[in-house]
Image: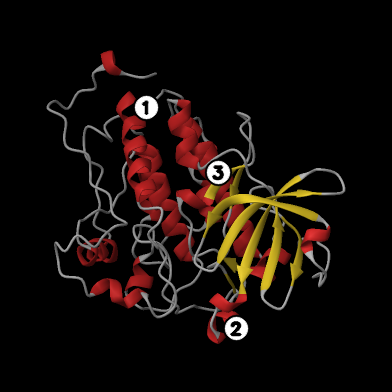
C-alpha cells in the first residue's frame, strides 16, 4: 500500500515545526531534532541541501520516492515533506533507542537467541523492501537504530540515501556502499541486484556472533581482495561455542556468487531463525570486542565513509600497507589459551 503521507508542501517548515539541535550528518544532508508546534510531538528532520547535489545526483537520488513507498514496522517512517528553492525537508520518525551495537554493549550481554530474533526482524524488513523494489545498498550497524530505549523496542532500518528503486529484473552498476559491508560483485564492477543487501546482513550477523568483522586488513586494496574472494573463517576460541546452524546461516549469506546467496525469504525459513536457539550468554569478551569496535568507528565519525558515484574506484589505488583502510578493523589478538575463562565473564 505504501506510506500514506501528505503531499510535498511548499510553505515554510518553521510554521509548523520548531527546529532543534543536530542529530547527525551525512554526505548531502544534516538531521536535526524538531518539535511539532501543534502538539509538541518530537520528530527527526532530514535537511537535504540541493546545492550539494550535482545534476546527476539530483537525477538519480531516489530517497524521496522510496520513503513515499516504505511502510513497515522495522523501517524508519516518513510523515511529511517540505521543499524550498534550496532545501528539501523530510519529517521522519525520531529514533531514540540508540544504534544496534551501542545497545548491545550497554546491555552487557548477548546470546544467539537474541541475535536470531534480531536477524529475523531485519530480514523481514529486507524482504518487504525487496518486494516493493527497494534495494538499500548501505546496510550496516550504524543504520540500524532502535525506536526507543525500552527493552522491547523494535529495530529500524534507516538512511535510505543510497537506496535504489528498481524492478525485480533490473540490475545496478553504481559503485556505492561502506567498506567492510559491501558485496563482492560491487567491488568487481559487475552489475548487481538486491543480493547485495543479503551480503551486508551476513557481515552484520558475523559481527553479532563474535564481536569483530569477517574481513579485515590495514590495506584497503587487500581488504577488497578478501571480500571479492570471500576469504573469512570462524576462528577459535571466538567461534567455539557458536552453533553449527548459526555458522551455516553466515556461510549462506557470505556466498560470493550472488545467485547462490540466500534471499531474505530463505533466511526467514532457516532453522537458526525458526528453531530453538540457545539463550546462553556469550563470553564477556564478546561485549569488550564490540565496545572496542564501536570506539574505533566513532573516532572515525568525521571521516567520509560512504563511497558515492565515481569515487569508489579510487579506493583500489592505495598501496598495500598505506594505512588508508580507515573502514577496517583488526581481529582481536588470540588469547593464550583456547578455553573460556568463566571467572572474567560479564554475564
At horizontal 29% and vertical 76% (from top left) the residue drawn is 314
Q: SS of the residue at dot 2?
A: helix
Q: In this view, does 212 lie above or below 179?
A: above
Marking on residue 59 = 2
Q: Quadrant of residue 151?
A: top right
Colouring chosen for the image of the structure: secondary structure
Q: Distance between the residues labelled 2 and 3?
A: 34 Å
Residue ID for mark 1: 282
Q: Which numbered disc, 2 or 3, marks the residue closer to the eye?
A: 2
| Distance between mark 2 and mark 1 Cα atoms | 47 Å
Q: Is residue 104 above or below residue 255?
A: above
Task: Estimate the spatial distance between the alpha carbons at disc 1 and disc 3, rounded to whole Å.
Answer: 19 Å
Front residue of 19 and 123: 19
Q: In this view, does 183 lie above or below 84?
A: above
For the C terminus, give its image quadrant.
top left
Residue drawn 41% across the image and 24% down it: 281
Give the mark, 1 or 3, whose residue is nearer the N terminus. 3
| Figure check: 210 above or below 143 | above
User: Looking at the picture, how far across and down is residue 95, in whole percent?
Assistant: 63, 44
Of the image marks 2 and 1, the number of the one nearer the N terminus:
2
Q: Badge 3 is on which residue?
A: 120
Amino acid at each position: 500500500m505504501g506510506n500514506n503521507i501528505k503531499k510535498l508542501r511548499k510553505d515554510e517548515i518553521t510554521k509548523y515545526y520548531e527546529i532543534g539541535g543536530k542529530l547527525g550528518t551525512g554526505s548531502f544532508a544534516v538531521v536535526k531534532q524538531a518539535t511539532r508546534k501543534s502538539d509538541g510531538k518530537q520528530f527527526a528532520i532530514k535537511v537535504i541541501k540541493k546545492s550539494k547535489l550535482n545534476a546527476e545526483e539530483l537525477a538519480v537520488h531516489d530517497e524521496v520516492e522510496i520513503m513515499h513507498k516504505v511502510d513497515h514496522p522495522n523501517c524508519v517512517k516518513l510523515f511529511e515533506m517540505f521543499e524550498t528553492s534550496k532545501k528539501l525537508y523530510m519529517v521522519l520518525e525520531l529514533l531514540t533507542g540508540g544504534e544496534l551495537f551501542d545497545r548491545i554493549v550497554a546491555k552487557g550481554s548477548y546470546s544467539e537467541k537474541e541475535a536470531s530474533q534480531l536477524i529475523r526482524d531485519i530480514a523481514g524488513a529486507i524482504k518487504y523492501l525487496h518486494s516493493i523494489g527497494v534495494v538499500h545498498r548501505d546496510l550496516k550497524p550504524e543504520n540500524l537504530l532502535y525506536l526507543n530505549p525500552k527493552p522491547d523496542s523494535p529495530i529500524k532500518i534507516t538512511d535510505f540515501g543510497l537506496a535504489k528503486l528498481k524492478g525485480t529484473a533490473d540490475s545496478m552498476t553504481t559503485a556505492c556502499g561502506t567498506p567492510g559491508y559491501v558485496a563482492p560483485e560491487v567491488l568487481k564492477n559487475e552489475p548487481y541486484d538486491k543480493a547485495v543487501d543479503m551480503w551486508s546482513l551476513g557481515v552484520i550477523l558475523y559481527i553479532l556472533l563474535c564481536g569483530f568483522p569477517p574481513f579485515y586488513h590495514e590495506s584497503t586494496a587487500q581488504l577488497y581482495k578478501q571480500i571479492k574472494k570471500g576469504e573469512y573463517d570462524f576462528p577459535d576460541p571466538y567461534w567455539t561455542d557458536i552453533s553449527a546452524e548459526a555458522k551455516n546461516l553466515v556461510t549462506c549469506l557470505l556466498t560470493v556468487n550472488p545467485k547462490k546467496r540466500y534471499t531474505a525469504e530463505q533466511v526467514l525459513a532457516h532453522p537458526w531463525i525458526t528453531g530453538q536457539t540457545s539463550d546462553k550468554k556469550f563470553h564477556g569478551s564478546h561485549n569488550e570486542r564490540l565496545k572496542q569496535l564501536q570506539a574505533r568507528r566513532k573516532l572515525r565519525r568525521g571521516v567520509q565513509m560512504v563511497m558515492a558515484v565515481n569515487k569508489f574506484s579510487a579506493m583500489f589505488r592505495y598501496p598495500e600497507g598505506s594505512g588508508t583502510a580507515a573502514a577496517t578493523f583488526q581481529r582481536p589478538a588470540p588469547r593464550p589459551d583456547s578455553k573460556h575463562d568463566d571467572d572474567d565473564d560479564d554475564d
